[in-house]
Amino acid sequence: MNAPSSAQDADPTLEGVVTRSTGSWYHVQVGDRIVRSRIRGKFRLTRQDVTNPVAVGDRVSLRVNDEDGTGLILDIHDRTTKLSRRASGHRTDEEHVMVANVDRAWIMQSVRLPALNAAFVDRLLVAAAVNEIPAGVIINKMDLLTDEQRTAVMDFHLRYADLGYPVLPMSALHGKGIEPLKAELQDQMSVVTGPSGTGKSSLLNAIEPGLDVETGEVSESTSKGTHTTTHAELHSLSFGGYLVDTPGIREFGVRQVHPKDLAHFFPEMISYVNECKFPDCTHDHEPGCAIQAAVDRGEVHPARYDSYLRILESLQEEEEKRF
Ligand SMILES: Nc1nc2c(ncn2[C@@H]2O[C@H](COP(=O)(O)OP(=O)(O)OP(=O)(O)O)[C@@H](O)[C@H]2O)c(=O)[nH]1
Ligand SMILES: [Mg+2]
Ligand SMILES: [Zn+2]
């Protein structure tokens, strides 16, 4: 308990936002300065289902040690939103909070090196929808687009635009097409996520050249990035707002969804779910399924339906493991 403070003693508790987390140390922005901080042990003990009790974006109360200037995080404020994924490793039911309190999630893809991955986009769109975070899609490296790819990229673009998601083609490296994104980022707390090498950190440098965020190479032989960004980091934008740069994700596992609710997170499927013959239809094999019929009629994109089936399967496997 705190000792009662006299009138001369100002309350030494400060408020800040976590800009970086390395596991044991957290960077907390307090006004204009960054305080290197630790957390109280109790957060680790009470949240065993989460790999990281404090995430980038969290608003916290902290106290600063006068002697060495380090902070101790005393309290984490309630989150408005969070974007989490299944933690990698043996305990697949564990949650890893990628970022807290974001208003907007941008899913980054590149036309080449690495190639577009619609299944990845669909899993992240579901995760964002589950957490009620509006999402958009960025198609980067437009300068690498070849004639053979043009139709596929256009199909990809239209697929998501038709569903109502903002889709922004750009070339982060050359600073092309970034103005529309800047308008979307202004005064918002946003996160950019995507596979390694798609250009997330390059995007930060394009919109805020002073940041000088480290970027890495993409292997020509494997088309994979080299996981240059190793920790999520929140950057302040000079035109207002924050953008969180995140490490490239190898695999994104959807959590927190009951298999029977999954179709509700595919906007184009919602209107059909109550028209299936069986009320507990999983939309993967049942006769009289309105969603399968919509796929056959071309009203639901087959790639989206395929993503639905793959996520459904992984959620059903998780369910089985629980019993
Ligand atoms: N041609 C081209 N290359 C780009 C573009 N944007 C980024 N790159 C290159 O792609 C490579 C990877 O860029 P990064 O910004 O490090 O990618 P990242 O998404 O942050 O990757 P991780 O931190 O590993 O997750 C670098 O060599 C960049 O120069 C672009 O618009 N066009
Ligand atoms: Mg990066
Ligand atoms: Zn059905």
Image: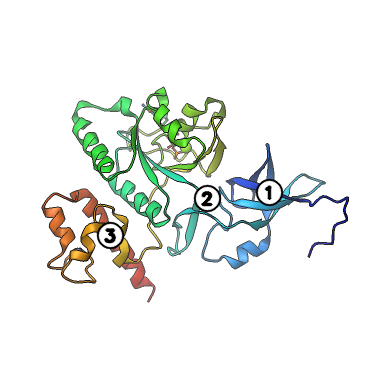
Q: Residue at x 16, y 61 (%)?
A: 290
Residue type, label 1:
Glu
SS class of the residue under badge 3?
Answer: helix
- Reply above or below: 283 against 81: below
Rendered image quadrant of residue 315 = bottom left
Q: CA distance from mark 1 to mark 2?
A: 15 Å
Residue type, label 2:
Asn
Q: Residue at x 19, y 29 (%)?
A: 148
SS class of the residue under badge 1?
Answer: strand
Q: Which residue is mark 2?
A: 101
Can residue 302 be seen here?
yes
Q: Which residue is mark 3?
A: 263
Rendered image quadrant of residue 316 = bottom left
Q: Is residue 207 left or right of residue 22?
A: left
Residue type, label 3:
Ala
Q: CA distance from mark 3 to mark 2?
A: 25 Å
Q: Is residue 93 left or right of residue 41?
A: left
Which badge, 1 or 2, comes first in the chain's sequence? 1
The numbered disc on residue 169 is: none
Which residue of the protein is positioned furthest toward the bottom in this rendering?
A: 323
Q: Which residue is mark 1?
A: 15
Can residue 216 be seen here?
no
SS class of the residue under badge 2?
Answer: loop
